[in-house]
Amino acid sequence: MSADYVLETRNLIKEFKGFTAVDDVNLQVARGHIHALIGPNGAGKTTVFNLLTKFLIPTSGQILFNGDDITAMKPAAIARKGVVRSFQISAVFPHLSVLENVRVALQRKEGHSFHFWRSQKVLDRLNERAYELLASVGLADFAEAQTVDLSYGRKRALEIATTLALEPELMLLDEPTQGMGHEDVGLVADLIKKVSKGRTILMVEHNLHVVSKLADRITVLQRGSILTEGDYSTVSADPRVREAYMGTAASEEQDRADEQAAMEVVEEARG
Ligand SMILES: Nc1ncnc2c1ncn2[C@@H]1O[C@H](COP(=O)(O)OP(=O)(O)OP(=O)(O)O)[C@@H](O)[C@H]1O
Ligand SMILES: [Mg+2]
């Protein structure tokens, strides 16, 4: 029997003006797994991610979701099918309350007209579901808070709640712990583990400690191609992986330090 893959790419290629950023990638994401996409700077992780989430159009190749060809579909169409990307810049509205943000996401999922929501019974049900979602990400006590006032880690938790509102079968996470302090990294990693129950997660993640804790399977990209795949112990013991990371480790660390500093400035400016 063939394995049960939620997502597959076949000979996926993306060229930018003659430069091949993604070079014949055949990715297979098994149902129920947390699958991590890793690799050194410039390996093509973000480009693959943007192809999967339809932010970029492939030069050639196919993307299959549950066996259906979704290569030509728009982001909104794949979201309706159950492929949802989290951690977009504008995923949450800073000046709405935490509860309101989840309600907006739930309404988006239902897609009904404004008038539909005037029924008190429907509104009650919506609030109930919104509170459930907030509780599931540990934000029950923050329902009335202004989103802008949340800590960085809690904003991410809220983003996860708004993603869960869409009931995704496959969650695509773009660097979920990027720019976070130690405490928030742990919080978000635990949360990802928790919400992975009953669904599939594909994440691009720089933090190898997080990858080692969460990922059932890891694909290592290098210069646009898959270098190797396997569980963490297999992949981390592979000398080719170590070699691929050598020389980029120092600059990545610097990148992260820069990011962290930038984030702190932004947070401070926001007050
Ligand atoms: N829009 C673009 N136009 C031209 N080249 C691009 C474009 N986007 C990405 N590239 C190139 O494609 C390669 C892969 O980039 P990508 O951002 O996918 O790497 P990455 O693995 O996400 O790296 P990082 O770890 O630094 O985030 C890089 O050489 C990059 O310069
Ligand atoms: Mg990237």
Image (tube, rainbow, N blue to C red):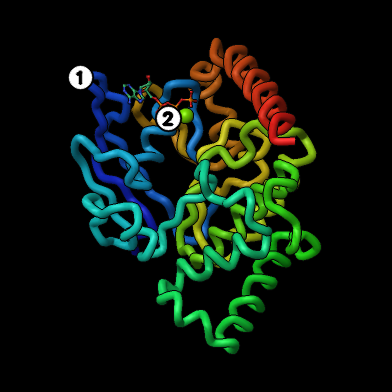
Confirm or reject: label 2 Cβ below 8 Å from ligand 1. yes
Neighbours of disc 2 within 10 Å: few (<14), some (14-19), many (20+): many
Element under label 1? loop
The answer to whether any part of residue 180 appears in the image is yes
- Looking at the image, is 76 positioned above or below residue 136? above
Q: Is residue 121 left or right of residue 5?
A: right
Quadrant in which the C terminus is drawn: top right
Neighbours of disc 1 within 10 Å: few (<14), some (14-19), many (20+): few
Callout 2–callout 1 Cβ contact below 8 Å = no
For residue 183, the mark is none
- Looking at the image, is 111 positioned above or below residue 264? below
- Residue located beneath label 2 in the image: 221
For residue 18, the mark is 1
Q: Nearer the viewer, residue 89 or 34?
A: 89
Q: Quadrant of residue 123?
A: bottom right
Element under label 2? strand
The answer to whether any part of residue 217 appears in the image is no
Residue for point 67% across, 44% down: 213
Position in image of residue 79 (x %, y %): 39, 60
Q: Is residue 37 left or right of residue 12?
A: right
Residue for point 45% across, 80% down: 115
Position in image of residue 187 (x %, y %): 74, 47
Q: Quadrant of residue 191?
A: bottom right
Position in image of residue 206 (x %, y %): 58, 31
Residue for point 52% across, 41% down: 89
Q: Nearer the viewer, residue 185 or 153?
A: 153
Quadrant in which the N terminus is drawn: bottom left
Q: Nearer the viewer, residue 51 or 229?
A: 51
